């Protein structure tokens, strides 16, 4: 069982247009709404691949039914979604997609949660961790924090993991990611820009990313998985540094690919080269889909996930 936590879920609405002209009235070609949030995406990918996972997320009282329906429509059953009631409403994120591929995103900040609601969310997570302790599951905290929730939330998540012997992975950024590292989480999965923010300077090459990841491991994190976009990914732990690629000529949509990567890595145990290879394969599969919904992994996805310990440190990282 892999338990994901999405502190700031969203209703993701994608609106397709011929062209976007600011200040004008537009008629949409199509619109689609999905239940979004990084942890929810991870759980969706795991469930579709046949693994056990439950996504924990806050929900306003009027949001619950819609969230359950949207989850079911994307193959997350009622048993795969644990909602904790809050007074505020789940945010909406809007993506405007023009025919030429130009994408404009409008993301709301999310609801304001109070200390009592935060305690309720943590209590649910602790109860689930206690129940699944024997399954050697993961707790995976994913994404941004809503207003009113400080980075101490991820510290508390790490403490829950320590209490019940469940490893904790965190995929976030900024102060939230820094707090998770300081608390001693087991695994982090930043992209190279987020890792650069964590260490306080831009990472321009693969060598820069490796040195930064080694520094984080030196602070007590077991494994650092760094996604490098089209340049591949890295796994760094105290024993090894491994570089991997899984190139694709069918990139349709990169949104959610990092979530699929984390899901794949956790499905393979989260540690070691196998986790990196599986993460790359799942990420490669994800970029074929026009939605954040996770497609079936094909044999070629795994076959093209190549790993190496002989690394060209001078490879320049793309933005």
Image: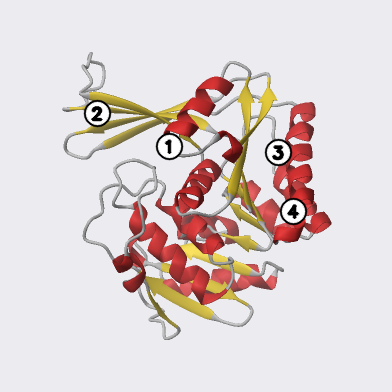
Give the Cα separation between the discs numbered 1 and 4.
Answer: 29 Å
Q: Position of residue 73 (x, y in %)?
A: 42, 32
Give the Cα separation between the discs numbered 1 and 2.
Answer: 20 Å
Of callouts 1 and 4, the N-terminal one: 1
- Residues tagged 3 and 4 counted as in contact (Cβ below 8 A): no
Is residue 319 in view?
no
Of callouts 3 and 2, the N-terminal one: 2
Q: Position of residue 226 (x, y in %)?
A: 49, 64
204 over 26 or under it: above or below = below
**Eye-nearest disc, 3 or 2:** 2
Which of the pair 167/245 is nearer the observer? 167
156 over 111 or under it: above or below = below
Q: Secondary structure at mark 3?
A: loop
Q: Position of residue 250 (x, y in %)?
A: 22, 56
164 over 85 or under it: above or below = below
Of callouts 1 and 2, the N-terminal one: 2
Of callouts 1 and 3, the N-terminal one: 1
Res. 158 mark: 4
Q: Secondary structure at mark 1?
A: loop
Which of the pair 311/118 is nearer the observer? 118
Tell me the residue that label 1 is attached to.
Answer: 74
Give the Cα separation between the discs numbered 1 and 3.
Answer: 30 Å
Of callouts 2 and 4, the N-terminal one: 2
Residue density around tag 1, few if under 14, some if 14–19, many if 20 or more, within 10 Å: some
Tell me the residue that label 3 is attached to.
Answer: 150
Residue density around tag 2, few if under 14, some if 14–19, many if 20 or more, within 10 Å: many
Which of the pair 126/154 is nearer the observer? 126
Residue density around tag 3, few if under 14, some if 14–19, many if 20 or more, within 10 Å: some
Tell me the residue that label 2 is attached to.
Answer: 16
**Eye-nearest disc, 1 or 2:** 1
Q: Secondary structure at mark 2?
A: strand
């Amino acid at each position: 069982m892999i338990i994901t936590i999405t502190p700031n879920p969203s209703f993701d609405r994608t609106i397709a247009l011929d062209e976007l002209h600011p200040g004008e009235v537009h008629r949409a070609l199509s619109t689609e709404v999905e239940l979004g949030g990084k942890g929810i995406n991870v759980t969706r990918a795991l469930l579709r691949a046949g693994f056990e996972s439950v996504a924990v997320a806050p929900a306003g009282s009027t949001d619950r039914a819609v969230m359950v329906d949207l989850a079911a429509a994307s193959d997350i059953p009622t048993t795969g979604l644990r909602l904790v009631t809050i007074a505020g409403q789940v945010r909406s994120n809007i993506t405007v997609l023009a025919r030429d591929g130009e994408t404009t995103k409008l993301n709301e900040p999310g609801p304001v949660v109070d200390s009592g609601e935060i305690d309720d969310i943590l209590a649910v997570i602790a109860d689930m961790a206690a129940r699944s302790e024997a399954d050697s599951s993961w707790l995976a905290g994913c994404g941004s924090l809503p207003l009113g929730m400080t980075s101490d939330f991820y510290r508390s998540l790490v403490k829950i993991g320590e209490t019940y012997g469940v490893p904790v992975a965190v995929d976030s950024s900024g102060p939230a990611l820094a707090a998770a590292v300081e608390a001693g989480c087991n695994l982090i999965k930043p992209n190279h820009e987020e890792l650069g923010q964590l260490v306080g300077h831009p990472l321009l090459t693969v060598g820069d990313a490796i040195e930064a990841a080694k520094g984080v491991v030196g602070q007590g994190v077991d494994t650092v998985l760094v996604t490098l976009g089209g340049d591949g990914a890295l796994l760094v732990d105290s024993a090894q540094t491994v570089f991997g690629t899984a190139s694709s000529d069918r990139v349709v949509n990169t949104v959610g690919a990092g979530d699929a990567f984390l899901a794949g890595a956790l499905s393979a145990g989260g540690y070691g080269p196998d986790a990196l290879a599986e993460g790359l394969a799942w990420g490669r599969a994800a970029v074929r889909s026009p939605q954040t919904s996770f497609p079936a992994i094909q044999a070629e996805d795994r076959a093209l996930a190549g790993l190496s310990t002989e690394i060209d440190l001078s490879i320049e990282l793309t933005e």
